[in-house]
Image (tube, grey):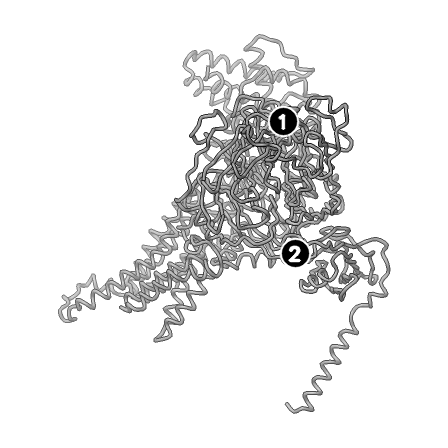
Amino acid sequence: MNRRRFYLVLVLAAAGVACLAASGPAVPDQASPVGRPARIEPDYGGVVIPPNIAPLNFLVRESGSRYRVRIASQQGDPIRIDSRSAKIAIPERSWRRLLSENRGQELAFEVQVQTADGWRQFDVFRTTVASEDIDDYLVYRRIHPAHSAWRDMGIYQRDLRTFEESTILTNDYFRGGCVNCHTFCNNRTDTMLVSTRSGAYGNAAVILKDGLTEKVGSTFGYASWHPNGKVLAYTSMKVAMFLHAAGEEVRDVIDLNSLLAYYDAGSRKIKTAPDLAKKDRLETYPTWSPDGRFLYFCSAPLTWTSRNAIPEKYSEIRYDLMRIPYDPNTDTWGQAETVLAAQEMGRSILLPRISPDGRWLLLSLCDYGCFPVYRKSSDLYLIDLEAPGTRDASEKGRSGLYSSTESLGSISLKNGRDATLGARPGFEAEKSNQEIFPPQSRSDLPFSECRYEARRLEINSDQSESWHSWSSNSRWIAFSSKRGNGTFTRTYFSYVDPNGVAHKPFVLPQKDPTHYDSCLWTYSVPELVTEPVRVTKESLGRVVRSSRKVSVEMPITTATPKPEKAPEGTTPYLAGRE
Amino acid sequence: MVRSAGFFVGACLYVWLWVQPCLIYSCGAITNFPPFYRGWSFFLAGVQYPGGAAQYVSALLSQLLAYSWAGAIVIVAQAWAICACTGYLLKAVRLPAGRLLRFVPAILVLVAYARYSFHLPLFLGAVAALAFACLYIRLARGKRDLGVWLVLSAVLHLVAGGAFLPFVGLCVAYEIGRGRWTRIGLYLLIGLALPYVAGVLILRVSVVNAYTDLLPLSWRVRGWASREQMIVAVYVAYLSAFVGMLIAGLGRLLSARWPRRQAGDRPGAGWLVRSFRRPAVQWTLGTLVLFAVGGPAVVLSLDAGQKASLAVHCYACRRMWPEVLEASRDCPDSVHVMNAVNRALYHTGRLSQDMFLYAQQPDGLLLTGEDHNVYYWHAFDTLIDLGLANLAEKNLTECLETIGEHPWILERLALVNLVKGKTAAARIYLGTLRKTLWQGSWAGDCLSRLDADPNFTGGAKTHRLRTDSTALFYAKEAMLTALVEQGDGNRMAFEYLMAWYLLTGQLAKVAQQIERLDAFGYAEIPPLWQEALLIYAYGTGKPVDLHGRAINPVTEQRFKHFSSVANRHGRDRAGAAAELARDYRGSYFFYYFCTVVAKR
C-alpha cells in the first residue's frame, strides 16, 4: 500500500468514526429530569464505602434502551459508563483510582436512561468514601440453607479489592463432609482454625500455626484465638436442631449442654476451668479481649436434666454476657462475672466480638436461644467499653442486679458477688489480682462501678443480623444478614465511625449485580482478614484426610465430670447450620 | 451399517415408548442429576476445571430427558457412539469378533437406562475417551504420533477429566499390539503425571478429583447406592474396547513369537466351516445373534415396578390425577404411591368415596419426611396443598441438598415461600429457575406477577398452619387437627383428618367430626364415612348425631349383610375375608374387618 492510499484509508476511517459518534443518541445534557433517584440494586445510595473496595456494579431498575452513568468526585476524572444493558459494570482501574484520590469525599452517581421519549435524568445518589481501608480479604462459608443434610459447602476467601473468590477448603477434599468454624487470630491468617466433620476421615480441628498445618483429633465449636496465638478457647456442646411447625423460620437450635474449653497450642492439650464449665450453666461463644486479659463468653442457666429432649421452655433460654480474667503467663483463670444480664435486657445476648482497639463490643441480641441466625429478632448492639457511666446510689444498694434504661437498651455491668476482684476465691493468694487482672475499661472507674450503654444499631433490619466481625483497624464490621429475603444470609459491611455510629451497610459487591437475585447460597460467618489464607486447599485437604493427628483428651465431659475421658456424644455443631 | 441402523432405531423407539426417559428426569432417587442454567456464568464456572466441559454438555443433554422422545435420542446416541468407537478400536487391532462385540457395551448402556439408573455424564466421559482413542489411531502416523497423543491428552483431560486415564489405557493397549514399548512407557508416565500437573497444579482441583472425576471410581459415585446402580455398564463401556485391544495386541505379540503354521500346514476346512466364513452368512448370523440376545436383554431388563412407581411420582408432580390413579395399578404397594393416590383422589373429589379401592395404610396418608426419605418428593406437595408450609419447606430444602437443584424442586421451594408470604425468598428461587431451560418462562411470568403485585395478594387462596409448636412438627393427627380447627375452611385438611381416623380405626372421632360437615359445605355424609358411622353405632350401641343428615338405606343394608357374612364365618376370618372380598372390596367395612378387627 502506498502512502497516499494509507492516508486516504485513515481519513475515511476517522470520518466513519465521527459519523458513528454523531448518529448516536441524543446528548444526555438534554435529558429531562425525573425528580427522583433511579432505582438501583444493590442499594448503594447513602452508604459509606472503603477506599479499597471492588467496584460497586449495580443494576438500574428502570426500563430503557440505553444507560449512562457518570461517577464523579472532587478529585480525578469522572468515570463514564455507556451501556445498552441495565447492568452497570464499573471499570476496575478507573474505580480504584477515583477512590484512592477521594478518601473522605463523596462520590456522586448520575444516572441517565434512554427511553422512547428520550433521555431521562435521575437525581444523583451519593456514597461516601471513608478514609480508612477495610481489610483486604473476607473469609466466609458458603452453604445452601440446609436443615440436616448438605451437599456442597466450603470456606472461601474473597479479595475485597476485586471480585476474585478463591477456595480455602471445600468438602470435595474429604468426600463430602462438613467444613466450618473458621477462626483467625488478630485478623491475620498465619494462625487459624478450620473444623471439619467427615464420615470417611473423622472429625477434626485443622490448625494452621507457625507455618505448620496439623489435625487435632477433636472437634472445636465456636472458637476464639487468644491474641498471643497460643491458646484457642472454644465451645464444646451437645447441640440439637428442632423445627417450628409454623412461623417464618423453620429451623431452631438449642445447646442441650455446653462448656468452654481451651486448646493450648504449645503443649497440645485441652484444658478447662471451673468457671468455664459449670454443670448448671451453658457456656458458649468465647471471644478474647484484644489485650488477652479477659475471655468474654455467653452463659445461660441449665434448667433441664435430659440431654436428649428439647426442653419445653426452650423459648425462655436467654444467655448472659460474662467475662473471666485470664493470665496467659501463668495459665490461670479468675472468677467469671456477669457483664450484661439477659434478665435486664429481656433478650438473649450472643456472639460478643470486641473491636481490635478494645473500645467497642459488638453483640447479637435476640428473643431467646443460642443461635441468632435463625432468630428473626436478632439485632446488632454496640457497647462503648471506654465510656462507662456510674451506677447511681439506688442501684449500688442492690446486690448484683442493676436495672437498665430499657428505652435506650442500656446495660449495667453486674457483679453478682458484689466483691472486689482481689477478693475472689480460688486465686493464688500471694498474687495481687488487681495487678494481674486490672479492669479492662480504660476509665478510672473500678469494674464493679462501671455501667455501659448498649445501643441498638441503626443498621439493623427486620430480619436476622448475626455473625459479625471487625476489621483490624476497628472501623469496619462485616456481618451476616437475611434482610431482603429472610432465608439466604448475605454479607454486609458497615462503617463504624470513631463515635461508634454504624453507617448504612452495603452488601458484598459482585461483578454481576444481579448475582444475588438467583443465588441459592448463604454467605455465613464472614471474617475480615488482612491477608489471604496462604495454605493451599490441597494441603488442608491432605491434612484432613491424613491419619496423622494430635490426640487430645477432654478433661471433663459435658454430662458428668469424669476426668481423662473424651466427651460422649458431644457434637460441636450441626451439619446444616449456617 | 444396516444392522446398526436397525438395532439403534429399534432401541430408540423402545426407550422412547417403553422406558420413557421423562421418568428418569423426574426420578427423585437419582441424586446426581445435574442442573443446567442458561448464561455465560454457568458455562464459565463449569468449563474451568478438568472434566467441566463434559459435565456442562452432559448437564445440557440431561435436560432433554424431560421429553421422552428427545431423551431417547440422547440415550441411543450415547449407546451408538460407544458402539461405533468400540467397533473402530477393535477393528483397528483386527479382533475377529469385533463387529459383534461392539454391541455389548451399547446394550448395557440401554439396560442401564431401562433400569432407571442415571450415568449420562459417565457415559459421556466414556464416549470422549473412546472417541479420542479413535482419533489417536486415525491421526498417529509415523513420528508425529507422540505430538498427536500429547495434544489429544491435554485436550481430553481438560474436557473429560478423569476419563483421560482410560484413554491412556486404550492407547497403551493399542501400542502393545505394535510392540512399541518406549511409547508405552512414555504414555504411562505422562498419563499418570498429566492430571496432577494440569489438574492439581494448574487448574487447582483436588488430587482425587483430578484423577477420578467422570470415572465410576469417583467418590461422587462410590458409596452411594443409587449412583452405583448399574455402574457395571460404565465399566463395560470402557473395558470392552480395552480388553479386546489388549487381547488382540497380546495375541499378535504371541503369534509373532510363535509363528503361525504355514498355510500349507493348515488342514483343509470342511463345507460347514467354509460356509461360515462367507461374509453374508457371518452377517446374517451376527444379526440374528444381536437381535435374539441383545433385544430381549434390553427389553426384559425394564424394571416395570420401578417404572410404575416413577410414573406415579412424575404424574403426581404434574398434578395429572387420572394418570396417577391409572399408573398406581401397576405399582407395588408403597407409602409413596398411597400418598399420591390419596392426593389424586382428593383432587378428583373421590377420597371419601373411593380411597379403599386402592391399597391403604395409615403411614401412606401423610409423609412428613421424618424418615429422611426424600426420593419421592411428590409427597411434599401434599403438605403444601394441606397448608403445612414449614414441613414442606424443610423437606423440600432437604430434597435440594440430596437431589440437587432440580427445576421441579426449585419450583416447589418458590411456591412454598409464596404460600408463606416470603415473596423475596421466592424471588430468589424463581430467579434461579428463570435460568433453566424448561421452567424459565414460567418463572419469568411469576416474577412479572410479583413485580406487579409484590405481596402476591392475587395468588390462589392457600391455607397455612398458624399454630407454632415444636411438638407438632411431625405429629400427623395433631397437625391435621390444628389445620381443621383454625376455621379457615381447609376442606382438604378435614378430609385428610377423616381419612386418618378411618385408616387408624378411630370411629368415635369420625362421629365427633360430623358436626363440622356444615362448616365444610357437605350436603350429605360421604359414603365411606357413613360406613364408619354404621360400624361405630352398631359396634358401640351409642347414638350418633348426624346433624340433620341421613345414612343411605342401601349402605345400612350392605352393613347388615356384611355383618351376617362375617358372623357366619365366626373365627374363620380368612374365609370370611375371601367371601366378603367379592362384594365389599373397596368398602370401609372390608378395610375395617381386615385391618382393625384382624388386629384384635
Under mark 2, the amino acid is Asp
Nearer to the camera, B598 or B443: B443
Toward which corner of the image does residue A228 lie, by quadrant? Answer: top right
Q: Nearer the viewer, mark 1 or mark 2?
A: 1
Query: Which label sits on residue A148?
Result: none
Looking at the image, residue B578 sits to the left or right of residue A282; the answer is left
The residue sitting at the top extreme is B541
Nearer to the camera, A278 or A308: A278
For the residue carrying disc 1, how many other residues have a C-alpha within 10 Å: few (<14), some (14-19), or many (20+)? many
For the residue carrying disc 2, how many other residues have a C-alpha within 10 Å: few (<14), some (14-19), or many (20+)? some
Q: Residue A552's x, y, as percent?
A: 43, 37
Q: Give the chain letter at badge 2.
A: A
Query: Which label sits on residue A512?
Result: 2
Image point (56%, 46%), residue name: A184
Please tell me whether mark 1 sits on a helix, a strand or a loop: loop
Q: Is residue A215 above or below residue A430?
A: below
Image point (65%, 37%), residue name: A440
Q: Which residue is mark 1?
A: A317
Under mark 1, the amino acid is Ile
Q: Is residue B377 visible?
A: no
Asked if the residue at tag 2 contacts the one at tag 1, i.e. Cβ–Cβ closer than 8 Å, the answer is: no
